[in-house]
Each structure stands twice: as structure tokens, then as C-alpha cells.
Amino acid sequence: MNLYRESLKIKSITIKNRIGMSPMCMYSATDGMANDWHFVHYATRAIGGAGLIIQEATAVSPEGRISPYDLGIWKDEQIEPLKKITAFLRSQGCVPAIQLAHAGRKASHDKPSNGEKQLLPSEGGWQTVAPSPIPCYDNELPPEELTEDGISRIINDFREAALRASKSGFQAVEIHAAHGYLLSEFLSPLTNKRTDRFGGSFENRIRLLLMIVDAVKTVWDNDLPIIVRLSATEWAEGGWDIRDTVKLAEILKEKGVDIIDCSSGGNIPTQQIQIKPLYQVPFAEAVRKTGI
């Protein structure tokens, strides 16, 4: 009954309890900059006793934002406001982590309170990118298929974002590869129809994620954890499933990833999620058996 009070040591960090705040987009930024709203939002959770806070999806590039209101970490000017947040969280005994993200074909949308519709460039939106030119919804404009040069830029964007995260005082970094965003789109055979080295086989579809992990490791402190968030299943026939996740988790463990953050779904509008109490726990249990 008191397990939640027990501390947990991962590499050089100690999480004081088992209470962790998941990354949840707040859609409250301008030009990707954290502000007083974000400080109060995260500070109050730290004061409330959370041992770990993973900051919401923070875009590695402007076009990687889900919406124009997302946090970002694509330029050095975004470091100082984040340092203010991490310093306060650490003063409360809370471990600050950050989720690095690229929204892929799900980028350039309005915030939920405005209906989440796709935004055109004339409405403050931008051209989206993805592994293949398949729109998320039939009534949306298709994304642009990434070239290998574009893929190389995204790998570098994640590397630079991880470096800025380190300079901002974060003690763990999470690579977002779930919920139908860019890296999840590459993993899925339903959204990745490429015929080059980034598509087709399982080994090719996971290639971009592995390259990003390698790039992040070149700038991230080896004593601090690296987390990867995965959708354990897409809940769709012919899509990514728990067997793929377990296989990938074993490879990520060999790569030096410390934690798999298990979630599910988010890539296919026709997904059939079988919701019940603790329905995602078996996914985490299967991944833990890999030893990660």
C-alpha cells in the first residue's frame, strides 16, 4: 500500500516517490516560449509532491508542433524560461524531465478548445511532413513525404533539442515515438509506405528512431536517463502491435535506453481501443520482461 512512497534510483537520479506526472500538452505558449503560465502549472505539481514531472511535448522544430500554441526547444532563446522551471522543480525534490517531439502529419492543428481542425498556411498553419503522403483524416491536406535530407535535418533537430534540454537543467529526456506523431508514423506499416531504407521491413521502419536515439546520446549526459514513449499497439488490424513493441524494446535496451513509457493508440482514426480498468498495464508487463 505504501509502494508509491518508495524512492526509485535510475542511473544518477533518485525519484523520491512513485508519483509521476505524464507529459500533457497545455497549448499555452507563443512561439514555443515557456511563460509564467507554464511555471505555475508545473511548480504547483512539484509542490504537491510529484517525484517526477515530464514536461509536455516540446517541439524540436517549429513545424514539429501539434499547434501554434505548443512549447518548443528549437532555439537557444527558449532555454532561459525552461531553466526557471527546472530550477524550481529541483528545489522541491522533483526530477524534471522533458518530452522531445515532432508531430509529423498531426502538426499544424488548432488547439482542442478551438476544435483541433487542420490549420492552413493562411490561418497560421504550415505544410506538414510524414514518412508517406497519407493524411490523418480524409478531409485534410496530405503531408509532404520526407526526403532523406529532410530526415537528416530532423535527426539533427532532436540532437540539438537534447543539448538545449541539458542546458535547461532537465534530468531526463523522453523521445516521443507514440500516438501517431512523426516517429510513430515511421514505425507503423499503416502510415509508412516508403520503399527506401526507412520503410518496408520492421528493421527499416525502426531505423529513424534508432538514429535519433544515437544522436541524442552524443549530447546527453550518460549518467542521466533516456526514455522512449511508444504506443504498444495501434488497436488496428495490420498495424503496430505489442509483439513489435517488445522486439523494439529489446533493441532499445541494447542501445542504452533506460525506460520505455508504455501507451497505446493515436495513429489511426479507425482504432478500436478496448478500454477497461488498467487496460494498458499488460503492455508494460510485457515490456518489463525484456529487462528494461
Image (tube, helix red, strand yellow):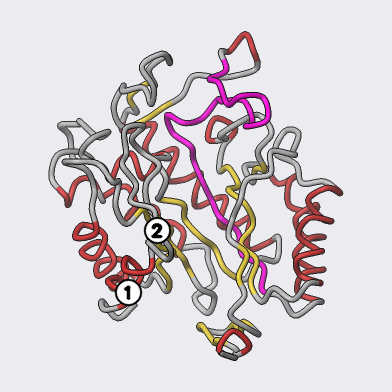
User: Would residue 198 appear left or right of 5 to someone viewing this image?
Assistant: left
User: Would residue 50 appear left or right of 249 to someone viewing this image?
Assistant: right
Residue 103, magenta (yes or no): yes
Residue 103 on image: x %, y %: 48, 37
- Tell me the distance, in whole angstroms, between the alpha carbons under discs 1 and 2: 16 Å
Disc 2 is placed on an element classified as loop
Q: Nearer the viewer, mark 1 or mark 2?
A: 2
Residue 57, magenta (yes or no): no
Q: Is residue 164 above or below residue 121?
A: below
The N terminus: image quadrant: bottom right
Res. 87 image quadrant: bottom right
Residue 192 circle label: none
**In the rendered structure, which disc, 1 or 2, sits on the residue that comes first in sequence?**
2
Q: Which residue is mark 1?
A: 285
User: Which residue is at 76% across, 70% downward?
Assistant: 46
**Who is closer to the viewer here, 166 or 103?**
103
User: Would residue 53 appear left or right of 274 to someone viewing this image?
Assistant: right
- In magenta, the rendered stretch is 95-119
Q: Which residue is mark 2?
A: 276
User: Which residue is at 84% across, 56% downward?
Assistant: 40
